[in-house]
Image: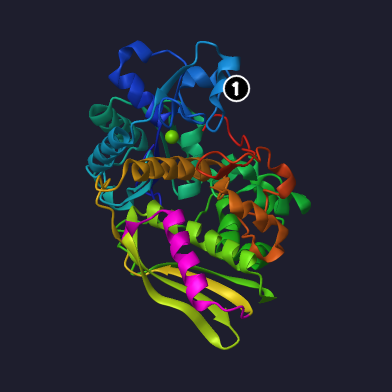
């Protein structure tokens, strides 16, 4: 097989059970054992687990005591974020030896665009093997690689054979390969989109073509139109390399008309704080200055620029600024929009030890939250007060929609005031 005439050549590299594999690689006694990583040795929620643990039905997000019921020999290990990020960086760096066009998708996943390297690599199998070799050489862990002509198909391919797989889908076969695959299998299609499609009798990728693209566009915007192509193995999305630091990062939301309830305004602000914080974290940024605004009939009120004590990407820190803004600038006016913008996003300078131990804990907690939310959907884990959002139809973003009030199971607040919502087991192999 040659890739000479492929219009685009895209690989998705996915480390297998990344954190658990790292632990096994550095401690051979753990090889072949059912291990799981938690936040600290007493953490109750499994961040990730080895394939041996998965064979017992243990999965990311499961509680440790449940896991022990399934497998009494289950070994719980504290996470080691500094080590994981170091190894992740080493892996990403070595991948640049394959192609300069890399999009780091998460701590353990990257898209590689090899379209412009076709002269060097002309056989997809040899590229895949090379990638796996390089990843293993710097990390001691195995990865799964999917190669195709677009991002979605490459990601789907990488999932097909795990662990340590290599799957190549010729771009011309992509539509046919995906034809009978459930739309829910594709990356980016959450339960909300899935149920929207299901209501219209669309369950498989092949069936999406039955719908006019406009219906998806109308409901989900650009993402909707993209999905229509994705399902045909023609995902137009580019590998986003050379990501520049954005000038600002902001999120705003229109509220129900004439909102005068302080509690409701506050919940909107918490929601936007979390969104801004998550986006900062996703881009390894933090910010110190924020715009926090409330739109009233007479225009914006609020803080044009409010400064946090330190650069932050923690939602609760931003929320604290919102609280201050509310008490200083809001005097009961009706508000119909809120906006929070991080004005000076800057690259994170690693863990700042200057902060108290608590802050370090908070960072670890945020990492876990991001990890779980990435797997199970935005706001699967969220601050407890956001639970009230479900009473307010306008607040809920499309990504949020599938998770209804009734589906929340643990209503207990843990000491970090985080509510654990029911975690959907979308894909036990992921
Ligand atoms: Mg992975």
Magenta-drawn stretch contains 23: no
Count of numbered circles on the image: 1
Pointer 1 residue: 66
Image position, residue 330 (x, y; %): 54, 77
Task: Choose top left, top right, bottom left or bottom right for residue 254.
Answer: bottom right
Category of crowding for the residue at label 1, using alpha-carbon neighbours closer than 10 angstroms: few (below 14), some (14–19), many (at least 20):
few
The image's colour scheme reads: rainbow
- In the rendered structure, the answer to whether residue 47 lies left or right of residue 223 reads left
Element assignment for label 1: helix
> Toward the viewer: 173 or 416?
416
- Is residue 11 in view from this perspective? no
- Is residue 269 in view from this perspective? yes
Magenta-drawn stretch contains 315: yes
> Toward the viewer: 350 or 56?
350
Q: Which residues are magenta?
A: 310-333
- In the rendered structure, the answer to whether residue 65 lies left or right of residue 209 reads left
Write the residue at 28% across / 33% down: 83
Image position, residue 89 (x, y; %): 26, 41
Image position, residue 389 (x, y; %): 65, 58
Write the residue at 34% across / 34% down: 128
Write the residue at 35% across / 46% down: 359
């Amino acid at each position: 097989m040659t890739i000479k005439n492929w219009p685009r050549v895209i690989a998705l590299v996915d480390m297998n059970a990344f954190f658990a594999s790292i632990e096994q690689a550095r401690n051979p006694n753990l090889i072949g054992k059912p291990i799981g990583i938690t936040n600290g040795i007493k953490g109750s929620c499994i961040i990730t687990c080895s394939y041996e643990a998965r064979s017992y039905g243990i999965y990311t997000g499961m509680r440790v005591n449940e896991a022990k019921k399934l497998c009494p020999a289950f070994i719980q290990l504290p996470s080691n974020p500094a080590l994981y990020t170091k190894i992740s960086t080493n892996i990403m760096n070595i991948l640049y030896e394959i192609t300069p066009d890399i999009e780091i998708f998460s701590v353990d996943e990257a898209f590689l665009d090899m379209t412009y390297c076709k002269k060097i690599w002309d056989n997809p199998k040899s590229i895949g093997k090379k990638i796996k070799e390089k990843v293993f050489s710097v990390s001691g862990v195995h990865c799964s690689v999917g190669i195709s002509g677009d991002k979605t198909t490459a990601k789907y391919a990488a999932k097909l054979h795990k662990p340590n797989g290599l799957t190549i889908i010729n771009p011309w076969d992509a539509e046919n390969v995906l034809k009978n695959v459930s739309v829910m299998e594709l990356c980016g299609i959450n339960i909300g989109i899935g149920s929207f499609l299901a209501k219209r009798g669309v369950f498989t990728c092949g069936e999406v073509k039955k719908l006019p693209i406009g219906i998806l566009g109308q409901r989900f915007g650009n993402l909707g139109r993209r999905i229509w192509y994705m399902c045909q193995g023609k995902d137009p999305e580019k590998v986003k390399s050379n990501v520049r630091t954005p000038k600002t990062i902001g999120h705003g939301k229109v509220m129900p008309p004439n909102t005068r309830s302080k509690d409701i305004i506050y919940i909107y602000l918490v929601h936007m704080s979390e969104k801004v914080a998550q986006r900062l974290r996703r881009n390894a940024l933090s910010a110190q200055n924020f715009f926090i605004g409330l739109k009233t009939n007479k225009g914006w009120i609020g803080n044009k620029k409010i400064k946090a004590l330190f650069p932050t990407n923690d939602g609760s820190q931003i929320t604290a600024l919102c609280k201050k803004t509310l008490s200083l600038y809001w005097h009961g006016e009706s508000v119909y929009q809120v906006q929070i913008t991080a004005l000076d996003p800057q690259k994170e300078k690693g863990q700042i030890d200057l902060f108290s131990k608590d802050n370090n804990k908070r960072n670890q907690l945020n990492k876990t939250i991001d990890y779980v939310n990435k797997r199970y959907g935005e706001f699967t884990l969220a601050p407890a007060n956001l639970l009230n959002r479900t009473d307010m139809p306008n607040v809920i973003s499309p990504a949020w929609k599938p998770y209804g009030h009734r589906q929340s199971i643990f209503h207990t607040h843990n000491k970090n005031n985080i509510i654990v919502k029911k975690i959907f087991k979308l894909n036990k192999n992921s």
